[in-house]
Amino acid sequence: MRLIIDRFEGIYAICETEDKTMINIERSLIPKEAKESDVLVKKDDKYFIDTVETEKRKSRIKSLLDDVFE
């Protein structure tokens, strides 16, 4: 399962799933260094930051914004 951290609210990370639904995950269950827009992968009962996918996603978003503001 792949998730994108949308925001943090109190003890929860509000994440978007692949099917565009939002779920709450306790912050204590995700890596401490996780931040908004990071891509998380769930394996078994653990969450990991997918650094490669996070960077790809950031590059795509930057490219789209560059196109809009040129």
Image (spheres, rainbow, N blue to C red):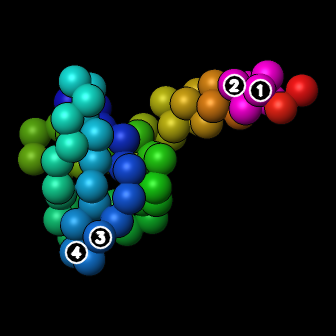
Location of mark 2 (residue): 64
Q: Which residues are magenta?
A: 63-68
- Give the x, y percent position of residue 64: 69, 25
- Mark 2 vs mark 4, foreground winner is 2
Question: Does the residue at mark 2 contact the one at mark 4 (Cβ under 8 Å)?
Answer: no
Using the image, determine if residue 13 lies above or below residue 58: below
Kindly report the distance in space between the C-alpha atoms of the residues bearing marks 2 and 1.
Answer: 6 Å
Q: What amino acid is found at the position of numbered circle 2 in the picture?
A: Leu
Indicate the quadrant where residue 25 lies.
bottom left
Which mark, by number, is residue 68?
1
- Disc on res. 11: 4
> Which amino acid, by three-letter code, is at mark 3?
Glu
Q: Say which residue appears at 37% left-offset and 49% top-offset.
A: 5
Q: Is residue 56 magenta?
A: no
Q: As rendered, which of 13 and 1 lies closer to the eye?
A: 13
Query: Could you give the CA–CA distance between mark 1 and mark 3, rounded to whole angstroms?
Result: 30 Å
The amino acid type found where label 4 is placed reads Ile
Q: Is residue 43 left or right of residue 35?
A: left
Q: CA distance from mark 4 to mark 1?
A: 35 Å
48 with respect to 39 (left or right): left
The reply to whether the C-beta atoms of the residues labelled 4 and 1 are less than 8 Å apart is no
Label 2: how many Cα within 10 Å (few below 14, some 14–19, many 20+): few
Discs 2, 3 touching: Cβ within 8 Å? no
- Labels 1, 3: front one: 1
Badge 1, how many Cα within 10 Å: few under 14, some, many 20+? few
Q: Which residue is mark 3?
A: 9
